[in-house]
Amino acid sequence: MFTPTINLDNATDALDTLAPEYRQAIHLAYYAGFDNGQVADLLGVSVDVADSRLSEGLTHLREALRVAA
């Protein structure tokens, strides 16, 4: 199975391009390790909104990484 290599500088730059609401949700879920319910509580939004921010944020992040590669 092929696993692409991601330059960490590109990844950081790509994260910086995200809107704050996406960046916050991704940071809480993937860097701090909170589950979606906890992310929702910390951001003061519903679980559906937290799920949407994570999903849309990851979509935008993938696109930013594709452009940076």
Image (cartoon, rainbow, N blue to C red):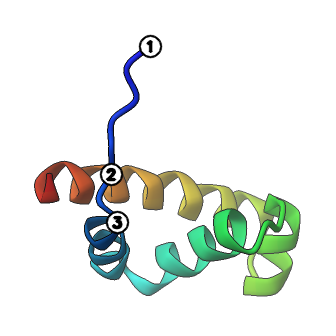
Alpha-carbon distance for marks 3 and 1?
22 Å
At horizontal 49% and vertical 77% (from top left) the residue drawn is: 23
Query: Which mark is drawn over residue 11?
Result: 3
Whichever of callouts 3 and 1 sits on the residue coming sooner in the sequence is 1
At horizontal 37% and vertical 73% (from top left) the residue drawn is: 15
Amino acid bearing label 2: Ile
User: Which quadrant is the N terminus positioned in?
Assistant: top left
Q: Residue 46, position in %: x, y? A: 78, 69
Query: Which mark is drawn over residue 6?
Result: 2
The residue beneath circle 1 is: 1
At horizontal 12% and vertical 55% (from top left) the residue drawn is: 67
Graded by Cα atoms within 10 Å as few (under 14), some (14 to 19) or many (20 or more), the crowding at tag 2 reads few
Left or right, residue 5 beside residue 34? left
Alpha-carbon distance for marks 2 and 1?
16 Å
Q: Quadrant of residue 29?
A: bottom right
At horizontal 55% and vertical 64% (from top left) the residue drawn is: 53
Q: Residue 35, position in %: x, y? A: 84, 60
Please name which of the two marks, 3 or 1, marks the residue nearer to the observer: 1
User: Do the residues under discs 3 and 2 have CB atoms within 8 angstroms?
Assistant: yes
Alpha-carbon distance for marks 3 and 2?
7 Å
